[in-house]
Image (cartoon, rainbow, N blue to C red):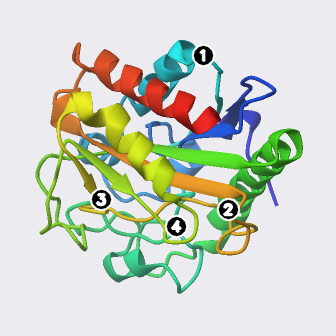
């Protein structure tokens, strides 16, 4: 079984004393040629789909936040598109997005059209990309636990101003910043620190249109030393939709994220 190239994901070191791991899973548009061959869209349609599905510039937001923070956080960045695999999905029947063809390996697009042929076996991509990624994030969390006694995962995402057809919960509020939380892994002080940090960027909401957090399954629901928060930024606040360039306000969001990182590091 082939293994992913080193460029599939990257752990960017931070300060030895930092418990914070900025996780950036959906910023890339890169798709290896052999994976591209299994996608049924033509090049123009694939480019449009990448415009809609990619959390554009979130890697830059995380990088600028890391550079501004007094204690540099660690960063775990996916270097491949979520159309290869989505590392934040459950790889089995627990994943609710299977209902719209968007489990760990997507078979449908944001507009519920065919992305891969019916009957596509997801297991080769899960073995090649999903499991190594999951192990690497778990190892990064273990390293922070060993070094600092705790780990704080801050997941950096974005979402479109207008709901796309694939969204299962798109009818709720769509604030400038949505904070995804978990009853076990998101302590109130982390949630409130995020609200305070992003107040400069407009209203913050909780778990709408997207909720929950990403925690490696090794620790999920069992280890309270691992705290987590998802930061979902509405795309019109920092870029031209869909898939266009960033605007000057990206710097404000990076500064707010840096403030959150500093609060979480204390």
Q: For residue 164, which quarter of the picture?
A: bottom left
In the drawing, does residue 92 fall left or right of residue 3? left
Residue 216 place in picture, x, y as percent: 67, 62
Q: Which label number is shown at residue 206?
A: 3
Report the mark closest to the observer, 2 or 1: 1
User: Residue drawn 51% across and 42% down?
Assistant: 31
- Do labels 1 and 3 touch, CB within 8 Å? no
Q: CA distance from mark 2 to mark 3?
A: 21 Å
Report the mark closest to the observer, 2 or 3: 3
Q: Earlier in the sequence, mark 2 or mark 3?
A: 3
Residue 239 place in picture, x, y as percent: 21, 27
Q: Earlier in the sequence, mark 2 or mark 1?
A: 1
Q: Secondary structure at mark 1?
A: loop
Report the mark closest to the observer, 1 or 4: 1
Instruction: Check the image and report above or below for 86 versus 168.
Output: above
Instruction: Check the image and report above or below for 153 versus 214.
Output: above
User: Could you classify mark 2 by the number of other residues whose Cα lies within 10 Å: few (under 14), some (14-19), or many (20 or more)?
Assistant: some
Identify the residue position indicated by label 1 in the image.
70
In the drawing, does residue 23 fall left or right of residue 61? right
Residue 225 place in picture, x, y as percent: 72, 58
In the drawing, does residue 131 fall left or right of residue 213? right
Q: For residue 130, which quarter of the picture?
A: bottom right
Identify the residue position indicated by label 2 in the image.
216
Q: CA distance from mark 2 to mark 1?
A: 27 Å
């Amino acid at each position: 079984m082939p293994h992913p190239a080193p460029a599939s994901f990257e752990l960017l070191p931070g300060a030895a004393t930092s418990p914070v791991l900025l996780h950036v899973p959906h910023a890339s548009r890169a798709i290896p040629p052999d994976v591209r061959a299994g996608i049924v869209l033509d090049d123009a349609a694939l480019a449009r789909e990448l415009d809609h599905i990619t959390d554009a510039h979130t890697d830059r937001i995380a990088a600028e936040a890391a550079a501004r923070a007094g204690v540099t956080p660690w960063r775990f960045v996916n270097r491949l598109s979520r159309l290869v695999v989505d590392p934040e999905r459950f790889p089995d029947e627990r994943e609710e997005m299977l209902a719209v063809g968007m489990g760990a390996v997507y078979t449908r697009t944001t507009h519920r059209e065919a992305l891969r042929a019916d009957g596509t076996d997801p297991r080769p991509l899960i073995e090649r990309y999903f499991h190594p990624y999951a192990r690497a994030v778990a190892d990064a969390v273990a390293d922070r636990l060993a070094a600092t006694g705790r780990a704080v995962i801050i997941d950096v995402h974005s979402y479109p101003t207008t709901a796309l057809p694939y969204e299962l919960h798109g009818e709720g509020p769509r604030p400038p910043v949505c904070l995804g939380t978990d009853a076990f892994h998101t302590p109130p002080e982390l949630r409130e620190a995020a609200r305070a940090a992003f107040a400069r960027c407009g209203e913050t909401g909780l778990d709408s249109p997207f909720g929950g957090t990403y925690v490696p399954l090794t620790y999920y629901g069992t280890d309270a030393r691992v705290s987590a928060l998802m930061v979902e930024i509405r795309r019109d606040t920092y870029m031209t939709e869909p898939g266009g360039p960033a605007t000057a306000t990206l710097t404000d969001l990076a500064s707010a994220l840096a403030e959150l990182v500093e609060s979480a590091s204390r």
